[in-house]
Structures are given as C-alpha cells and as structure tokens.
Image (cartoon, rainbow, N blue to C red):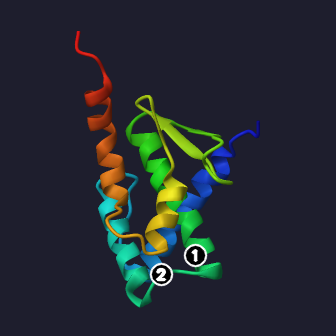
Amino acid sequence: MTAVDQAGLRELAAECMALVAADFGRHLDWSVASLSELDEVCAELLADGPLQGERLDLWWKLIGAYTGEVIVRAYDGQWITHEQAGGAYAVQALTVTGFPFALANRILTGEPYKSLASFARALPAIIERTTPAD
C-alpha cells in the first residue's frame, strides 16, 4: 500500500488557503467553521456551471486537501489510503472514514445538496449515533 504524503497534502491545503484569499478575498483558518467559507467559494466557482478540465483538477485537489486537513486537525484524525478513495486519499477521524476529495469532486461537478461544512460537522453526530450506550 502506498504511503500517505502528509507534507504534500498540507502543502496543497495551504495553497488552497492562499488562492482563496487572493482570488476571493476570503480567509480560511483551519477551522470547521472555515469550511462554510469554502462552501461559498465553491458556489462562486460554480456560478458559470460545473467545473471541467484543468480548472476542476486544480480546485478538486486544493479543496479536497484543505477539507481533509481541517478534519484531521479538528478531530485528531489522520490521512489514510483507501481502496474507495479513487486515486486520492481518505481521512479517518472519530472512527469514521471520510472522502474529502470525492466530496470536493461532487460539489465542483454540480451535484446539489453537498456541503463541506456539513460533512465536517456531521462526524461527531455519526459517532454519537453509532456508539452503543454504556
């Protein structure tokens, strides 16, 4: 199994922060709340329709890396390889495996009712509902 490029993922996430600040004037700060800002950036990116080609490839990588890194930091998670990650990495936090790159792709290709912030905020609720009571 391929080792996870932690440094490369952090670098992509930092590039996302810089590009969002430069192109959209929005500040991302590694918090779960900042994913709401990134959801708004996605809406602006989609104003002219779903992304395609090089533009999709760029934003998919940046947004997936930033979203995953926020989850890793907020919930003491880790980046992992996973057969369902489709050529990307997944995150594991609070015993849940998530696919931030797949979510970014779905959002950027125009799938409705998807949210980066909701994805991150849902993790504690998922754990609460799946953990047996004492």
Q: Quadrant of the C terminus?
A: top left
Question: Does residue 55 appear left or right of residue 70 in this picture?
Answer: right
Question: Does residue 49 appear left or right of residue 33 in this picture?
Answer: right
Residue 133 marker: none
Residue at (61% x, 52% y) in the render: 9
* Secondary element at tag 1: helix
Q: Is residue 32 visible?
A: no
Judging depth in this view, the residue of 67 and 21 nearest the camera is 67
- Number of labels in the image equals 2
Residue 56 marker: 1
Q: Quadrant of residue 57?
A: bottom right
The residues tagged by marks 1 and 2 sit, at their Cα atoms, a distance apart of 8 Å
Dot 1 or dot 2: first in sequence order is: 2
* Secondary element at tag 2: loop
Disc 2 residue crowd, few under 14, some 14–19, many 20+, Cα 10 Å: some
**Amino acid type at image mark 2:** Pro
The reply to whether discs 1 and 2 touch (Cβ–Cβ < 8 Å) is yes
**Amino acid type at image mark 1:** Leu
Residue at which label 2 appears: 50
Q: Quadrant of residue 96?
A: top left
Image position of 25 with respect to 30: above or below: below
Instruction: Residue at the far bottom: name it.
Output: 48
Question: Does residue 31 appear left or right of residue 2 in this picture?
Answer: left
Q: Is residue 28 visible?
A: yes
Residue at (58% x, 52% y) in the render: 10
Q: Tell me residue 75's x, y (percent).
A: 39, 36
Image position of 30 with respect to 49: above or below: above
